[in-house]
Image (cartoon, helix red, strand yellow):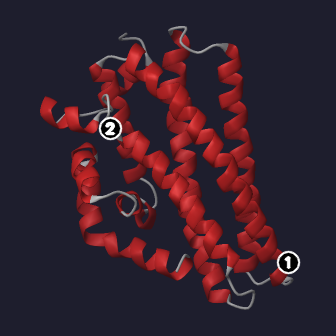
Amino acid sequence: MNDSPAAAAAATTTTTSSPRTMTTAVATSGGVSAIDLVRRALLDSGEELVSALEDVDPTDRRRQRALDRWFAGYAEQLRRHHDLVDTLIIPALASRGALDQRSLDTLAADHAWIDQLLSDLGDALGVLSFGLGAEAWWVGKASDLATALAHVLGGQLGREQRLMRPLVDRWFDDDEREIIERETMRAVATGPVRFSLAWLYAHVDEAERAAIAPLAPATSRLTWRTRRGSYCRTSVAAIG
């Protein structure tokens, strides 16, 4: 297994947690992993955006700009998650014969569809942010796109989890599963400062946060302690 993408990532991943910590953090029977929590946070955030756009005032430029900034961070985290799956997990599974062509095509189509929805929604929110006119129409357009995104994302992440989790448990060893967990947290933690660990931690409970915190880079944990209020302010201004 040393020639897999997961094994290659080990060369740049520093292991600092004990086996006891990883027993808690890595997905086990009945357990929850960092990547599962990221999927849940992405789904929850998508629903929050739908709710926010349902009652945004077309004349409220300040909130529209806040929504545009918030969405930029959310879209970045969603794309980071897909990049992790596309570059680390799928190639390793495919190289071992664990994924057939139909599954690969489905995953690729899901990611392409969601990327297009993210682009279209980002454009709509950008028009609102710059006040280019027809605000009521663009609010409706953004609301429709957010609803579509939440629906499509629910199906995509559900399929991803049902397909990937048992295959990862079967085909990856403990070291490789730990790499996936650490790379998941690194991808979140190195995102936009206002939409990184503070975003994820806002969607987990204290026990879950305690389990995954050791997986995040130390510098990112320090940044979270000093800047965690930034996400709260951004979220309140945009989502309410």
Amino acid carrying mark 1 in the image? Trp
Q: At which x and y percent is residue 201?
A: 34, 59
Judging by the rendered image, the residue that carries numbered circle 2 is 182
Mark 1 packing: few (<14 Cα in 10 Å), some, or many (20+)? few
| Observer able to see residue 128 | yes
Q: At which x and y percent is residue 211?
A: 23, 46
Q: Secondary structure at mark 2?
A: helix
- Dot placed on the residue nearer the N-terminal end, 2 or 1: 1
Q: Secondary structure at mark 1?
A: helix
Of all residues shown, which one is farthest toward the front? Answer: 30
Q: At which x and y percent is residue 70?
A: 55, 69
Mark 2 vs mark 1, foreground winner is 1
Amino acid carrying mark 2 in the image? Arg
> If the image is split into quadrants, where does the N terminus sit?
top left
Q: At which x and y percent is residue 122?
A: 70, 63
Instruction: Give the residue displayed 59% in from the left and 59% down from the top.
Output: 46
Relative horizontal placement of residue 45, taking residue 132 as reference (left or right):
left
